[in-house]
Image (cartoon, rainbow, N blue to C red):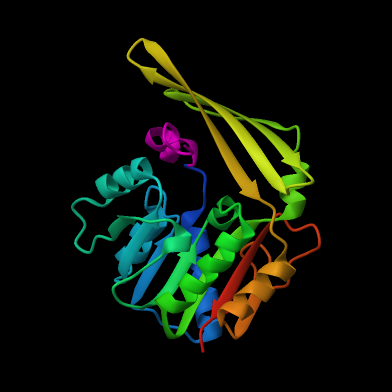
Amino acid sequence: MAYESLAASYDRLTNDVPYEAVLAFYHKILDRYGCKPASAVDLACGTGTMAILLAREGLSVLGVDQSEEMLTQAADKAAGMENPPWFVRQRMEKLRLPLPVDLVVCCLDGVNYVTKPDALRETFTRAFKALNPGGLFIFDINTEAKLRALDGQILLDEDDEVFCLWRAAFDEATRICCYGMDIFQKEGKLWRRSREEHLEYAYRTEELNQWLREAGFVRVGLYADRKLEAPAPDEQRVFIAAQKE
């Protein structure tokens, strides 16, 4: 399963991810839509970094992920906080909340990991139902252009404690990019090797726009990577915001 072995080293390998900059861009979108959230859900929350940042701003936050290992890391990171997020294991397309919230986010191409279009359409429906009137759903995707360009690429992440080798292959017929990953994690004087496979579906912005509107969202905006402007044709990451009336 994806992130089963990677979870323990995920934060070490992603220490260059600009979570604070992503959060700052969320605030720009929230201002544009006139939304001032008091509660939020972080879908595909992983090790909880974004959920924790939102909670530090005073929001009541629920982190949702399907990986038990990633959620364990998230809970450990949030321990001792004055206003900790709650974490729950759920698939996005099965999202069910006890109470609606003002904001739903899904960062770092979590949406691409939903590799069946029907499941993503159900995710959009669930996100719509999870929001209060006027609430916002904000997420980002790896674009088709980016995933196609990864075909045949070999990527390397490493530090003193972990070595991770990615091999990417893009299938034009299925629109799925497969990352075969070999992970070497240091344990004392030895290194433990494990392997994972990650799959991302290359969604197109026009179909996402259509499915969001079918789910009930009335105001949908597409943005370049952390910019309040329309994405370029070759944009590598696109942010999408959708508001519930």
Q: Is residue 23 magenta?
A: no
- Residue 76 in the image, given as x and y percentages of width and height: 25, 45
User: Which residue does the image show at 51% across and 84% down from the upper left?
Assistant: 244
- Compared with residue 159, is residue 97 higher up or lower down, i.e. above or below? below
- Compared with residue 182, is residue 220 higher up or lower down, i.e. above or below? below
- Compared with residue 154, is residue 91 higher up or lower down, i.e. above or below? below
- Residue 101 in the image, given as x and y percentages of width and height: 36, 77
- The answer to which quarter of the image holds residue 114 is bottom right
Pick the front one: 94 or 61: 94
Bounds of the magenta segment: 1-14
User: Which residue does the image show at 36% across and 68% down from the upper left?
Assistant: 96
Q: Is residue 8 magenta?
A: yes
Pick the front one: 94 or 202: 94
Pick the front one: 68 or 102: 68
- Residue 10 in the image, given as x and y percentages of width and height: 44, 38
In the displayed structure image, the side of residue 41 where residue 182 appears, left or right:
right
- The answer to which quarter of the image holds residue 144 is bottom right
- Compared with residue 75, is residue 34 higher up or lower down, i.e. above or below? below
- Residue farthest top in this picture: 189
Q: How many marks?
A: 0
Is residue 27 at least partly visible in the picture? no
Is residue 101 at least partly visible in the picture? yes
In the displayed structure image, the side of residue 28 where residue 100 appears, left or right:
left
- The answer to which quarter of the image holds residue 198 is top right
In the displayed structure image, the side of residue 101 where residue 158 appears, left or right:
right
- Residue 232 in the image, given as x and y percentages of width and height: 78, 64
User: Which residue does the image show at 35% across and 78% down from the upper left?
Assistant: 100
User: Which residue does the image show at 75% across and 41% down from the upper left?
Assistant: 171
